[in-house]
Amino acid sequence: MNCRHCNTKLLHTFLDLGFAPPSNAYLTIEDLPKTEKSYPLKIMVCDKCWLVQTLDFLDADQLFTSEYSYFSSTSSSWLDHSKSYVDKVCSMLALDEQSQVLEVASNDGYLLKNFVERNIPCLGIEPTDSTANAAEELGIPVVRKFFDEEFAKYLASKDLIADLIVGNNVYAHVPDINDFTRGLKIALKPSGTITLEFPHLMRLIEHGQFDTIYHEHYSYLSLYTSSRVLANNGLRVYNVEELTTHGGSLRIYACHQDDERQTHESVEQLLIREEEFGLKDLAVFKNFKSKVEKIKSDLLSFLIEQRKSGKSVVGYGAAAKGNTLLNYAGVKTDLLKYVVDASASKWNKYLPGSQIPIYDIEILRREEIDYLLILPWNIKEEVILQNSFLLDSETKFCVAIPHFHFCKTEQ
Ligand SMILES: [Zn+2]
């Protein structure tokens, strides 16, 4: 396979996680006896543009289906994050009733509802019916589509090009990053702004966040590579912010190449730090494997020890992250009884691959639990706070990444 961005032959493996089912393909009880489809989960790095990318096995329409069950509004910290972004960007760009905002992958309306409240015209683009329905119930206009160059041309023909295009956690999820980026260029007004948020590759490597690797996540991006892709499509990154979300993300601000805005010094500074870290050094990519193997063996040692001593371990959060970790480590119900999740759409289903059952979080109030393994480590503080009643029964909270440890709690 050749690089999705620059078409150079891909020669270097970053990480090989074996076979895995699509991480959002939750199973019903009827599905359990059937053979699950699983696909290689292998990540390559391009030695020319340094785009880290999955090998092609699955099409986007196999992954983002009408039953897609990731609802952004489930996380209260993500809702807060989105609201403060809207406050900031509205004043920064002086958006008002005359402006047009476009959000690509608007999910359940977690973000656009803040523009609706301010009477700023907005449009969501979202291919999954389940989440689009939820957004429409909030009064947000949604087009059920994948965003691409062709659709951007359609928007332009309807005079719907935007002052602000928002893409939160979508840039890394598009199979054809060049086509998507051409679309961004077309759908942007001459003086418009694009903001894109995505997990930062530098943090992934630094903190062993291999569980953010799954089929839906086609690209693993740095500022260097994302700037390069945008530049090759006539867009320029003029500012960048480092965020704590998803274990360390970037928010990049882009405009047309010939826009008058000056490029902020944060861009050059981060490019230098990325290079110093080794994001253009193959050895840094090749050494990642040993870090991942240690995370796996530490988690398994803990789980096996608890099983031997008759202690119960339950997982929190039936999300993509957990699936990658559990499937790679080969964890099944003998080691992890069940997983709880706040999202009702997942209750009484089973995790893909491991087939671990998913229950309503209310079960935590009824059963005695020795250890709660928090799978979405990026929201561990929120999880501990919401489940602090468990501390009375001496349940301990733990996470597997960046390395296995017990979480510090108030008691
Ligand atoms: Zn490349």
Image (cartoon, rainbow, N blue to C red):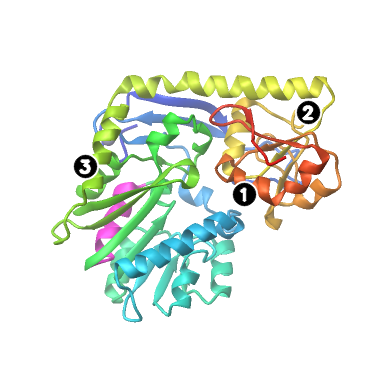
Residue occupying the point 62% across, 21% down: 298
Closest to the observer, 296 or 395: 395
Q: Earlier in the sequence, mark 3 or mark 1?
A: 3
Residue 302 visible, this angle: yes
Dot 1 surroundings within 10 Å: few (below 14), some, or many (20 or more)? some
Residue 202, position in %: x, y?
38, 34
Point out the quarter of the image occupied by ligand 1: top left
Name the mark on residue 382.
1
Quick check: 253 above or below 316?
A: below
Say if disc 1 is inside 8 Å of ligand 1: no
Q: Earlier in the sequence, mark 2 or mark 1?
A: 2
Dot 2 surroundings within 10 Å: few (below 14), some, or many (20 or more)? few
State whether the magenta stretch is mostly helix, strand or loop. helix
Give the quarter of the image for residue 92. bottom left
State yes or no: discs 2 and 1 in contact (Cβ < 8 Å). no
Q: Which residue is mark 2?
A: 334
Cα distance in 3D space between marks 3 and 2: 50 Å
Give, as a three-letter code, the residue at label 3: Glu
Say if disc 2 is inside 8 Å of ligand 1: no
Q: Which residues are magenta?
A: 176-189
Secondary element under disc 2, as helix, strand or loop, is loop
Query: Mark 3 or 2, which is nearer the eye?
Result: 3
Residue 253, position in %: x, y?
29, 55
Report if residue 245 lies within the magenta region.
no
Q: Which residue is mark 3?
A: 268
Quick check: 102 above or below 217?
A: below
Secondary element under disc 3, as helix, strand or loop, is helix
State yes or no: discs 3 and 1 in contact (Cβ < 8 Å). no
Cα distance in 3D space between marks 2 and 1: 28 Å
Quick check: 113 above or below 237?
A: below
